[in-house]
Amino acid sequence: MTTTMDWTRCLASFPLATGDLLATRELRRRTDTKFVVSPDAALSWLGGLNNDYAVLLAGDTRLASYRTLYFDTPDLEFFHAHRRGRRVRQKVRVRHYPDRRLSMLEIKTRRSDLESVKISCEHPYGESTLSAEERAFLDRHLGCGQGLCRQVWTNFRRLTLLGIHSNERVTIDLDLVVERGHLRETFPEVAIIEIKQRPFNRDSVAMSTLRAAHGRAESMSKYCAAMAVLLPGLRVNRLLPDLRVLQRGVS
């Protein structure tokens, strides 16, 4: 079983990402490819990347905390678009970054399997309600800002790597916890790897080494998984394979 010390020791072998490198790796428009593996497998894979990727600090730490609140319409329009595999689908979230005492309101739109776009604006740190100005911002981009409701929270730890020679961001999410009211579920036996690129490059170091380690791309959405687990009456047939991976872990 991996520990925080294991991750810290491994990440210490990576160069630190510079401000200049970060500025060229924003990737607001990109392709996203996700893999769900065991934490042990993720740590082993990570150890082979330190010549090609730099680690991004969050404040003073290499392993950042994320706390995210997702919004949806009363009839769960965004959730059902994901569940049905619609070509264009969206997520609205307020993401809190405790290590930097920063919060952002974000809209993420997946336009196809090959393109995701994210737009955002700064949000008052730690607040979980949307202001009139923020709802107007959502109205301009989505047309439904006034009716959005709070749905679920996700919490996890994330490490972020930036490609030194490739236009990539690589993230590994650990210790996922989902919450809705008094309901809470934890998923300590999985690591969610996401490779964000523009353009898509299946032969990048991160992608090719994952394939060599028999990593399989998944359509995992933390929001959809949280909703499916915490609202058991929802129709989730299409999500069941991903849910089984989360709940049973990865061998």
Image (cartoon, rainbow, N blue to C red):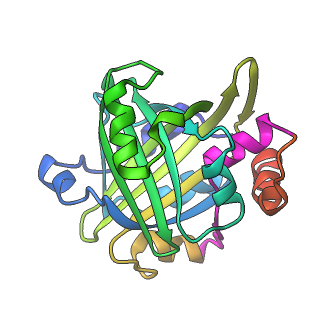
Q: Locate residue 132, reporting x and y percent.
A: 36, 26
Q: Quadrant of residue 82?
A: bottom right
Q: Quadrant of the N terminus?
A: top right
Q: Locate residue 157, reporting x and y percent.
A: 51, 35
Identify which residue, 101 or 69, lies in the foreground: 69
Would you say residue 156 is visible in this rendering?
Answer: no
Residue at the spot 71% in from the left edge and 64% down from the top edge: 84
Assess whether residue 98 is covered by the magenta stretch: no
Assess whether residue 213 is covered by the magenta stretch: yes
Identify which residue, 123 or 211, lies in the foreground: 123
Q: Locate residue 142, reporting x and y percent.
A: 43, 51
Magenta extent: 212-232
Residue at the spot 64% in from the left edge and 59% down from the top edge: 81
Q: Locate residue 34, reporting x and y percent.
A: 56, 62
- Left or right for 154, reference 243: left
Relative to 125, say whether 105 is above or below. Answer: below
Residue at the spot 28% in from the left edge and 29% down from the top edge: 59
